[in-house]
């Protein structure tokens, strides 16, 4: 070999003359963990890893059990039409195939009903003139006891009044719910009656003149009137028209008939989530006594940016979030952008802190296509590499950046033809010829 040849050989293999080595990306990830994260192949298949071409899977329960996630909750953000709902639906449907269940406590666009129907699940359609009813006081039937109904009704009246309840109002409501529950199955109407005509014995026992108790309840009665005789009448004022079958693979509360009324949506969501919560407790009892599937439930908040506008609902969601691990629940929060969470209230407000807390409690963040003006905020919240930053504004439909603690993936969600037919939200656009769906 000539001197030049020897030099070339030397620079090619280095001093150790290590031969070239070929291996699968799975093996190489072990050898060079700093170059590629360990493949995510636990759980239901999502599609393909866009970098390695390998299958990409996700299952928050197994990843949590394996210590790769600090909690099972997921935040999913992306522009309209990026494929967020399609991903949420695949996560739910494929989890059901793996023996889990999925609950959608509020679907403002009415696009989940066909999914639940395809799976043999339950759809509850709430809206003016529709036959379905949810009694918010049903939550009292849970082992939480009477405070369950009182808490739900407090959240509802706060939403209706658009302010927190004063201490006197809170007591008046608590006592009224208790009196109504003692007299039989409590409903919004019987609680309103107990607020108008409070039991003087309870008032005196609390050291409150009965006239003051009536005064404390006045604005609550005005607020509840909306559920009894106002524009929301017929949906929450009476016994629930459905009992939840704990074995149902999917339960969807369709709120599309409520239109763009955010207060109505928030009230309905509060009732629906309380109703589902008591069902979750029932389910856990059934789980202990009989054979069951793998357990684990998705609770999916699609179009969550709309739901987050109600502080009372946010507070309830936060409480449920905290319980998620104990209940085997993985919450999925679907947003347009992470800054939706900043838009819920003024800087420093309780609402803003609650929304930030929800994101902090999502250890998986999936980012679909984002407008460039969002990048700085995402970078501050999640940390992005230069490549990830360049990628986010150009991600095609169905492609997302998945950030798990300590590892990032770019994954392409693959839809089965049967799924695509059921999930198609572009159809409405094609039929009506445009507009935002
Ligand atoms: N991974 C994908 N492959 C093919 N089509 C998709 C994929 N994701 C979404 N779509 C289609 O794109 C359209 C918009 O998706 P959708 O999930 O409703 O978007 P978003 O919820 O982000 O607004 C739907 O018709 C859906 O069927
Ligand atoms: Mg959507």
Image (tube, grey):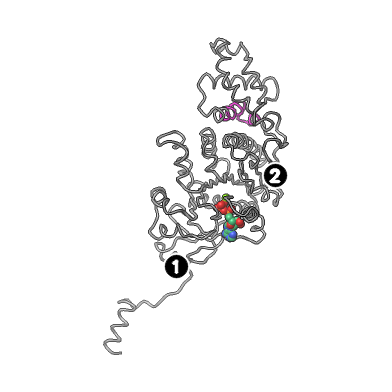
Question: Hey, which residue is sitting farthest front in the picture?
Answer: 433
Q: Is residue 49 left or right of residue 417?
A: left
Q: Which residues are magenta?
A: 137-156
* Residue at the image position 68 percent from the left and 50 percent from the top: 114
Mark 1, secondary structure of its residue = helix
* Magenta stretch holds residue 319: no
Q: Residues within 10 Å of mark 2 (few under 14, many from 20)?
A: some
In the image shown, does 340 or 176 lie closer to the viewer?
Answer: 340
Cα–Cα span, label 1 and label 2: 46 Å
Q: What's the mark number on residue 122?
A: 2
In the image shown, does 27 or 238 lie closer to the viewer?
Answer: 238
Residue 244: name its quadrant. Answer: top right
Ligand 2 within 8 angstroms of badge 2 C-beta: no
Residue 390: x %, y % from top left: 41, 59
Residue 418: x %, y % from top left: 67, 59
Q: Residues within 10 Å of mark 1 (few under 14, many from 20)?
A: some
Q: What residue did someone put label 1 on?
A: 28
In the image shown, does 124 or 42 lie closer to the viewer?
Answer: 124
Mark 2, secondary structure of its residue = strand
* Residue at the image position 48 percent from the left and 59 percent from the top: 395
């Amino acid at each position: 070999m000539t001197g030049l040849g020897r030099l070339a050989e030397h620079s090619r293999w280095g001093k150790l003359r290590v031969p070239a080595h070929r291996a699968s990306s799975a093996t190489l990830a072990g050898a060079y963990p700093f170059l590629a994260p360990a493949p995510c192949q636990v759980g239901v298949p999502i599609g393909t890893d866009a970098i390695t071409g390998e299958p990409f899977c996700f299952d928050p329960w197994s990843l949590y059990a394996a210590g790769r996630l600090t909690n099972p909750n997921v935040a999913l953000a992306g522009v309209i039409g990026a494929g967020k709902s399609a991903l949420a639906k695949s996560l739910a449907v494929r989890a059901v195939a793996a023996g889990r269940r999925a609950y959608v406590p509020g679907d403002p666009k009415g696009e989940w009903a066909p999914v639940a129907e395809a799976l043999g699940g339950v759809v509850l359609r709430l809206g003016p003139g529709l036959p379905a009813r949810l009694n918010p006081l049903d939550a009292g039937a849970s082992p939480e006891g009477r405070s369950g109904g009182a808490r739900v009704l407090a959240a509802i009246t706060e939403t209706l009044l658009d302010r927190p309840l004063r201490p006197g109002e809170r007591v008046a409501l608590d006592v009224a719910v208790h009196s109504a529950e003692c007299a039989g199955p409590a409903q919004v109407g019987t609680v309103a009656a107990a607020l108008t005509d409070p039991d003087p014995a309870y008032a005196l026992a609390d050291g409150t003149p009965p006239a003051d108790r009536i005064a404390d309840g006045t604005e609550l009665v005005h607020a509840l009137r909306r559920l009894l005789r106002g524009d929301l009448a017929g949906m929450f004022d009476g016994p629930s028209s459905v009992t939840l079958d704990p074995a149902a693979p999917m339960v969807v509360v369709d709120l599309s008939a409520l239109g763009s009324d955010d207060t109505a949506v928030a009230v309905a969501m509060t009732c629906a989530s309380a109703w589902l919560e008591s069902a979750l407790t029932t389910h856990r009892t059934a789980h202990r006594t009989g054979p069951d599937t793998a357990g684990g439930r998705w609770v999916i908040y699609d179009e969550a940016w709309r739901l987050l506008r109600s502080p009372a609902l946010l507070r309830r969601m936060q409480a449920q979030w905290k319980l998620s691990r104990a209940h085997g629940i993985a919450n999925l929060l679907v947003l347009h952008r992470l800054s939706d969470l900043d838009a819920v209230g003024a800087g420093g407000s309780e609402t803003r802190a609650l929304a930030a807390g929800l994101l902090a409690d999502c250890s998986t963040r999936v980012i679909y296509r984002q407008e460039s003006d969002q990048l700085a905020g995402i970078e501050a919240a999640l940390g992005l590499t230069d490549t990830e930053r360049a990628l986010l504004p150009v991600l095609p439909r169905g492609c997302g950046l998945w950030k798990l603690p300590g590892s990032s993936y770019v994954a392409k969600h693959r839809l089965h033809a049967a799924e695509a037919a059921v999930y198609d939200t572009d159809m409405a656009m094609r039929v009506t010829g445009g507009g935002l769906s």
